Image: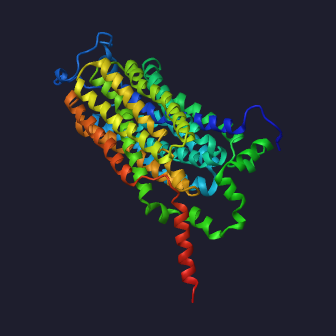
Amino acid sequence: MGCRGTTLIPLRAVIGFLGFLGIVLQYILKVTLSVAINGMVVHSTNTEVADETCPTPDNANANSTDAAQEGDFDWDEEMQGYILSSYYYGYAATNILGGYAAARFSARWVYGMGLITAGVFTALGPLCAYAGAILFMFSRIIVGLASGVIIPAMHVLFPKWFPESERQRITGALFSATYLGTVLSMSSSGSMVKNLGWTSVFYIYGGITIFSVLPWFYFVYDEPESHPRVSEKEKIYILENTKGNRAKRTEKNTDSHHKEDLIGNPWPMILTNAPMWVHAFIMFGTGWVSFTLLSELPTYVGNILHYDIDDAGLISALPYLFGWISCSVYSFLTQKFTEKGMRVITTMRIWDAVACIGSALCLLGVTLVNCDVTVIIVLFVLTMVSRCAVYGGSYMNHLYLFPQAYGSAAGLALTASNLTGILTPLVTSAFVSGRQTVQQWKYVFYVSMGMATLPYVFYLIFGSAEDQETPWIEKRKMKRKQQCVP
């Protein structure tokens, strides 16, 4: 047993950092193919529609097409769309399962095993690719399956380790890891492909991810009570300032059926709740914007703006760099607003308006400026900065709706968001396959605008930050009493 005395750095800060690091690595594994695929495929030399793309910039690499032709695989745009989306078939499939398993069994083990499995199958990616497109897609599905449990497991750990007074400030900083992972992946993958070969991104990032699991299992436990190295002072502080742990300590004095209902089978409550569905719809809309840029921006920058794979990766990383910075700002402002007495639902509606309406307006701007490359890049940056406002808004809405069943609720919300990872590459390829023109890409952005705007209308009508669990529990208790009356 380790020492339970005082520590210089709070253990929850270490847990938060390792959670942040794992999500960074998860997103690196997710995003790197979006850049690497341009170095994996043989690009067509057909220039029939060249006049319908933007002029080649003076600082673009004139030999980018020749370099791109060194790829090993003859996959057309349609096949590339299927390959890019294959990760998300697995990723979306395990969000709900991951949240449920983490809440019922162990978030620590669900997170850790998901991370190591994703790293192993990423490292096996080149071998699978050379064996065939189908096997490569299968390996990406496995990486997605393993990755899909990571963020839901962190959602389960989050309220157990971080007091309520810290959550709003930390939410943006912790989950902004998705953007930092994207920045690191996009900014480095192109250079790695260009200088070390496309296989390097799979070997290097897969290996780093595998070894990152070691400190995770050493430092992270499911709850303060079971951790052998948490200080007594910090443990008491956390237990006294978290609802979930207070509820656990007083569980013996409550109706045992309540806990069993919420953890064993929370779905009748969650799936019949309108505020939960509009929360999931918001996640779907903002996810559509994010994944459109995540999966397709390197292709757009390369094919329409004519930057080579190295420059395309760097340019595509810019929106996520500024998005990463803005996430913590939104969370900080949200905490300040609530400290001054603003209702939680009001802050959610304000920031969700920025995330949904703001990002749609920025994409509209992209469709209007045509080929002004500098303005286009600035608008993509503003799109992601706007989209990140959801972290100050309703991203953690499920914690307010379901204080105990948040694990399963988080899984549903994240599934809604990550379904867009499957859909956006397929929708994009339907528009641009064989037709890489400015006009066809405008259609892609029009769809994203609609998907971003519509959910916000429903959220204004049905959105809530009120506890939905307690009324449901009371109704169940009344039904049980009625059934017991002779």
Q: Decide which of 65, 53 is in the foreground and name it.
A: 53
Apparent side of residue 77 relative to residue 208 in the rendered image (left or right): left
Image quadrant where residue 305 sits: top left
Residue located at (48% from left, 29% from top): 326
Q: Can residue 113 be seen in the rendering of this structure?
A: no
Measured as percent of width and height from the top left, residue 434 is found at: 21, 32
Seen from this angle, which residue lies furthest bottom?
486
Q: Decide which of 157, 327 is in the foreground and name it.
A: 327
Residue located at (55% from left, 44% from top): 150
From this view, report whether residue 369 is shown above or below residue 265.
above
Q: Decide which of 398, 221 is in the foreground and name it.
A: 398
Measured as percent of width and height from the top left, residue 22 is found at: 58, 37
Measured as percent of width and height from the top left, residue 51 is found at: 17, 20
Image quadrant where residue 23 sits: top right
Measured as percent of width and height from the top left, residue 25 is found at: 54, 34
Seen from this angle, which residue lies furthest top?
58
Residue located at (57% from left, 90% from top): 486
Instruction: Give the quadrant of the N terminus.
Output: top right
Q: Decide which of 223, 453 is in the foreground and name it.
A: 453
How many numbered discs, if any? 0
Q: Can residue 218 be seen in the rendering of this structure?
A: yes
Q: How is the image coloured?
A: rainbow
Apparent side of residue 227 relative to residue 446 in the rendered image (left or right): right
Residue located at (42% from left, 40% from top): 350
Image quadrant where residue 389 sits: top left
